[in-house]
Amino acid sequence: MSKIILITGGSSGIGKSVGEFLTAKGFQIYGTSRNPEKYTNSKFPLVALDVANVATIKSAVSEVIEKSGRLDILINNAGAGITGPIEEIPDAEIKRNFETNFFGPLNVIKEVLPHMRQQQSGLIINVTSIAGYMGLPFRGVYSASKGALELITEAYRMELKPFNIEMTNVAPGDFATNIAAGRYHAPVNDKSPYKTSYGNTLALMNSHVDSGQDPKIMAEAILRVINTQKPKAHYKVGEFMQKFSIVLKRILPDKVYERLLMNHYKL
């Protein structure tokens, strides 16, 4: 019997690639989108869900359970980028980013857990980011929201052990997706003291996404996690240096690591 998988943010980017890949492997996939009617060519069904709206989360999960009778795997993929000098990003945008990247996934988890507990089985995969392992300049809010999801997963895993429900993080590096077009960019203000440093860093970040890896690599990694009986807490998927940067942070003195990051971003 094929497993039933719900992927938030399944209409584009990593979510779409993962959904198409897993569909081809025989899984029954439901993706989500805030406006599923826009994606008539989707290779798997899309249900309406906005992670910032609890009512739509409840409705979407109920729809999947009603149609399939169960839910085996949740892939918490929906997320949003945000860039800018922390001092200059409006509070409302910071809160909106946390609603999407942190509170949204938590609310989807809360909605699926009763069903998985009743089944006495389930797997939850939170798509985080390698950026969540370090505070990156002009991506500090994004790093913080993804890092928060990484950490809370560590705690959640232990709480769920008695129910035979597994939870893990899969942290991607830079992949060739449309995240740069959809992220919130604080404007590069001519009068800002950060004009030059932020402008240069923003151009570098966008180039990283444009030259990023094929999202299929992320899909293959998620399939390996699905096929692992007892997943680890953390998986990293990306180019060698992106993953190695996490190792360097563990072993290098703080100031040395900070200097490496500043040199990388030409600050």
Image: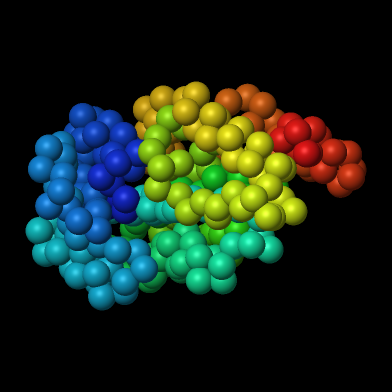
Of residues 189 and 252, the one drawn nearer to the viewer in this rendering: 189
Q: How many numbered circles are shown?
A: 0
Tell me: 12 left or right of 88: left
Tell me: 94 left or right of 70: right
Residue 187, position as x, y percentages in the image: 55, 52
Residue 230, position as x, y percentages in the image: 48, 46
Above/below status of 71 relative to 114: above
Of residues 255 and 159, the one drawn nearer to the viewer in this rendering: 255
Residue 200, position as x, y percentages in the image: 66, 37
Tell me the residue at 12%/52% (across/down): 37
Tell me the residue at 10%/58% (across/down): 67
Can residue 159 be seen?
no
Can residue 122 be seen?
yes
Tell me the residue at 41%/25% (across/down): 214
Residue 5, position as x, y percentages in the image: 26, 49
Answer with the quarter of the image where residue 25 lies: top left
Q: Please identify the quadrant where the C terminus is shown.
A: top right
Of residues 244 and 189, the one drawn nearer to the viewer in this rendering: 189
Above/below status of 75 relative to 249: below
